[in-house]
């Protein structure tokens, strides 16, 4: 399955239209008791476990509900998740300052700019036929960035293979009545907010918020809007990168 996923990423890259830009890519596939998490680029994915409290305190729940629906910025309010969160299988970002990525690119004659004080802001430099100038790509792997392929930017994903039976048993999911969910999100979200911050908000929407069976989707949309709101600059004139994310409860 890992080989199939890798070949798929390569085929998508090879057949991507040449429009002067590419993208990161992630996928999560569940087959039986196995979960495959694949990524190429600088987006973030992980598995989160929600550990529920013995009981929900109504006063805290009311506070959290007001917080989620309040889109005013700045705010001193914070989400007070009553359960707890643990993060597992977080992917590695593909950045040109990492030795294995840097070596591949430089061996193919590629140029890399690594800011001394901010190495995660590294760029792979290539001559853009679209812009007629040198342009820096923020990732060492991507899909559709044709002008960077010749200098070592590849579409090959890292693929994590998770045995769910082992994962459930190791983390005592059943005995603790815990819940598991996966999150995939672009760098516009995770450049400004830690994975724990995102996971806690999504866990609140999934497991602690006030909702009836017919309101789950609407409530999760509100939580999503809150995350976008909290990841965006307070001043509208400041730059905000694209923000997109997906979250899904994993049943097993």
Image (tube, rainbow, N blue to C red):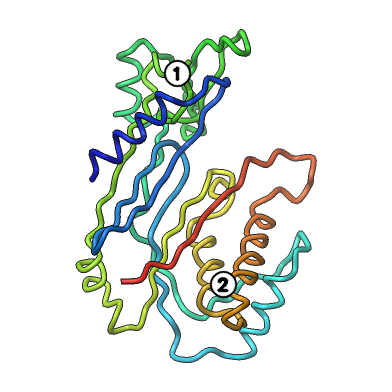
Q: Quadrant of residue 213?
A: bottom right
Q: Quadrant of residue 7?
A: top left
The label on residue 205 is 2
Is 187 on the left-hand or right-hand side of 242?
left
- Residue 243: x, y in percent? 61, 47
Circle 2 SS class:
helix
Circle 1 SS class:
helix
Which image quarter is the N terminus in?
A: top left
Up/down of 190 relative to 11, above or below: below
The label on residue 243 is none
Residue situated in front as seen by the camera: 116 or 73: 73
Residue situated in front as seen by the camera: 54 or 40: 40
The mark that comes first in sequence, 2 or 1, is 1
Q: 10 Å neighbourhood of mark 2: few (<14), some, or many (≥20)?
A: many
Residue indicated by mark 1: 148
- The residue lying at 30 percent from left, 14 percent from top is 107
- Residue 165: x, y in percent? 21, 68
């Amino acid at each position: 399955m890992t080989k199939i996923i890798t070949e798929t990423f390569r085929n998508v890259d090879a057949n991507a239209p040449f429009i002067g830009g590419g993208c990161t890519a992630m996928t999560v596939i569940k087959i039986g008791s196995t979960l495959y998490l694949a990524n190429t680029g600088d987006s973030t994915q992980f598995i989160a476990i929600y550990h529920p409290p013995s009981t929900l305190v109504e006063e805290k729940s009311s506070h959290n509900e007001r917080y989620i629906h309040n889109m005013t910025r700045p705010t001193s309010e914070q989400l007070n998740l009553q359960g707890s969160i643990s993060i597992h299988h977080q992917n590695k970002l593909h950045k040109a300052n990492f030795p294995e990525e840097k070596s591949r690119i430089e061996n193919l004659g590629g140029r890399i700019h690594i800011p001394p004080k901010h190495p995660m802001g590294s760029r792979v430099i290539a001559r853009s036929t679209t812009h007629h100038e040198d342009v820096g790509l923020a990732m060492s792997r991507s899909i559709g960035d044709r002008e960077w392929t010749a200098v070592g930017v590849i579409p090959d994903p890292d693929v994590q293979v998770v045995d769910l039976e082992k994962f459930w048993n190791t983390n005592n999911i059943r005995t603790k009545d815990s819940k598991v969910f996966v999150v995939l999100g672009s760098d516009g979200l995770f450049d400004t907010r830690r994975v724990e911050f995102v996971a806690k908000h999504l866990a609140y929407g999934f497991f602690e918020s006030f909702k009836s069976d017919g309101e789950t989707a609407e409530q999760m949309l509100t939580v999503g809007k809150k995350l976008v709101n909290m990841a965006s600059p307070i001043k509208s004139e400041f730059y905000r990168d694209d923000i997109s994310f997906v979250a899904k409860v994993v049943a097993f």
